[in-house]
Image (spheres, rainbow, N blue to C red):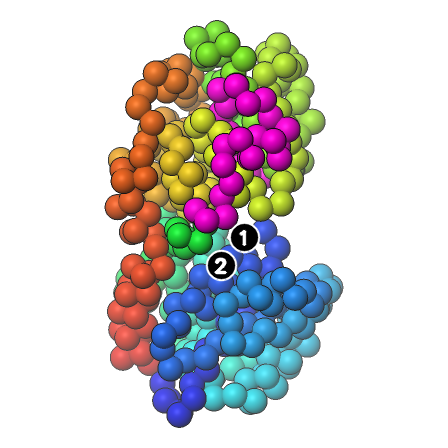
Amino acid sequence: MSSPEQPWVLQICHGYDGPFLDCAHQYAALFRGTRYKVLTVYLTGVRNADVEAGSASDEVVFLEYSSRDMRGLKLRAIRDIARLVRTRGFTLCIAHRFKPTYIACLATRLPVIGVSHAFGVYRRRFRQWLANVFSKRLMLLGVSNAVRDDLRASLPTWPENRIETLYNRIDLETLQAQQVTREAARTHLGLPSDAWIVGNVGRLHPDKDQETLIRGFAKALPTMPVGSLLVIVGRGRLEAKLRSLVEALGVEQSVCFLGQISNAKYYFKAFDVFVLTSDHEPFGMVLLEAMAANLPLICSDCGGAREVVQEAGRLFPFGDHCRLASILSELPNSPIPTEKSYRPCLERFGYKAAQEVFKEKLHAFNKKI
């Protein structure tokens, strides 16, 4: 890898919706205090001053492609990225998700780190072929060991040290300063001040398995404090089905669907416990956000989320609503976690720890290309 006087890192993101603005911020922040500058490119999404400010980058470019532009061979994107690369002394490219990785490999001659945020990314034959063609200058990172192992299974001929883990991370001090008090959070969300509240934040999607959450809550409800509520934050295609389940179980007065809440992580202190029932959770950022609010955690024992929880929370077998109900029944009388009890886990997923791990992996990658 060349080392010009002012080296730049190119970061390519498909867009900034959902968690991906935070992902861009996380990776750009790895270069704080170094001699590298970071230019972040968002392939889709209109120019946005808040996104630009939140990207933690020295420069941000919005290419504003349409969904149609991102189909097929993506020739326009390849051409535009190739032109952009010629304007700086870029030494490395970080690409989030497959399409940006594909574009980075074809548009540049840079070493490319492709970050996978989901399972199954390289199970398709074309994607395996592309990864193998560019294997000499491509390294893959999974956001958890579970995602890393899925990548390794999809690319069995790759050496293990070219497919590694770099966990998602949290800026604990910043987030805790942003999280509002219990009273303010409940007022903002329109929730009663005296209820015992079970919280869940995520898309209403089969992978999140809110059906098990609702069934477990309904079963536990008679043993929980009077007036207990289940609060679900998020939207998705299963909303009507989940509402029908709530009615069928006769708990309409105890379950609240709040829809999409902007910056929901700021209001986690409204909950008394946080529950994640996902099946295919690549990482589980919401678990770190709940820890920052010092909430007890319950999580399904699968995917990348269990790597986050470990001994910091309670695990139950995926889909086992009876076991979930048992844990929910016990929690109101259990000790509340303290910031001190969560500190080791949060530090493990902090920016400082990630910077050290990334530095080691980048050094090893540079030696092999």
Quick one: SS at disc 1? Answer: loop
279 part of magenta stretch:
no
Residue found at x 59% / y 84%: 84
Side (left or right) of 155 relative to 11? left
Instruction: Give the labeled residue for mark 1.
Output: 19
Q: Quadrant location of the N terminus?
A: bottom left
In front here: 308 or 146?
Answer: 308
Q: Residues within 10 Å of mark 1 (few under 14, many from 20)?
A: few
Q: Residues within 10 Å of mark 2 (few under 14, many from 20)?
A: some
Rendering quarter of residue 316: top left
Instruction: Give the labeled residue for mark 2.
Output: 23
Can residue 151 be seen? no
Q: Using the image, determine if residue 332 lies above or below residue 25.
A: above
Quick one: SS at disc 2? Answer: helix
Residue found at x 62% / y 35%: 188
Q: Position of residue 120 (x, y in %)?
A: 47, 51
In front here: 269 or 204?
Answer: 269
Q: Position of residue 336 (x, y in %)?
A: 34, 27
Q: How many marks can you see?
A: 2
Residues tagged 2 and 1 counted as in contact (Cβ below 8 A)? yes
Q: Position of residue 218 (x, y in %)?
A: 52, 14
Q: Position of residue 122 (x, y in %)?
A: 47, 58
Rendering quarter of residue 203: top right
Residue found at x 55% / y 89%: 86
